[in-house]
Image (spheres, rainbow, N blue to C red):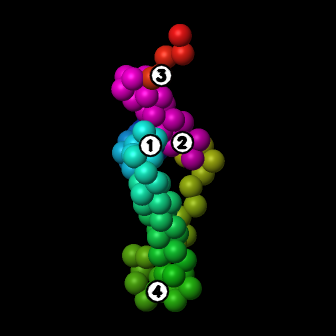
């Protein structure tokens, strides 16, 4: 059971780190460029997978079949998003959470 939890938890940890790194400039008010990069990066990945499926490239290259048929389970998604949120929370608290006193 440990390996079923470790892989999505590690992916979520890396996802949380990447998200904070890309959005840091936007979060501190240095401009929306990082936010646009963050959104466009996700759009590009989804578009690439859709293009692979639409052109039928997964039939010509068997290695792409696994990519186009991957459907993560709900527990995988929950673990991944939970570890991303936990990482973001820890970094937020360590990095200097705002104090309202």
In this rendering, the label closer to the viewer, 2 or 4? 2
Viewer-nearest of discs 3 and 4: 3
Say whether disc 3 or disc 1 marks the residue closer to the N-terminus: 1
In this figure, which residue is indicated by the disc labeled 2? 81
| Front residue of 53 and 89 | 89
- Sequence-wise first label, 2 or 4: 4
What is the C-alpha distance between the residues marked 3 and 1? Answer: 15 Å
- Mark closest to the chain's N terminus, 2 or 1: 1
- Counting from the top left corner in percent of width and height, residue 40 is at 47, 65
Residue at label 3? 98
Looking at the magenta stretch, what is its main secondary structure?
Answer: helix
- Depth check, mark 1 against mark 4: the one in front is 1
- Local secondary structure at mark 2: helix
Q: Are marks 2 and 1 in contact (CB under 8 Å)?
A: no
Q: Which residue is mark 1?
A: 29
Which residue lies under the disc numbered 4?
Answer: 57
Q: Is residue 86 magenta?
A: yes
Dot 1 crowding, Cα within 10 Å, few <14, some 14–19, many 20+: few
Q: Earlier in the sequence, mark 1 or mark 4?
A: 1
Image coordinates of residue 28 in percent, x first then y, are 42, 39
22 vs 61: above or below: above
Query: Left or right of 78: which side holds 1?
Result: left
- Residue visible at 59% across and 41% down in the picture: 78
Q: Position of residue 9 (x, y in %)?
A: 45, 39
């Amino acid at each position: 059971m440990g390996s079923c939890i470790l892989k999505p938890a590690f992916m979520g940890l890396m996802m949380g780190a990447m998200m904070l790194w890309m959005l840091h400039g936007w979060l501190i008010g240095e401009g929306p460029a990082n936010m646009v990069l963050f959104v466009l990066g996700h759009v590009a990945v989804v578009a690439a997978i859709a293009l692979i499926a639409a052109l039928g490239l997964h039939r010509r290259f068997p290695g792409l079949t696994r990519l186009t048929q991957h459907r993560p389970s709900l527990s995988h998604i929950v673990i991944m998003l939970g570890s991303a949120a936990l990482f973001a929370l820890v970094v937020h608290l360590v990095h200097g959470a705002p104090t309202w006193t």
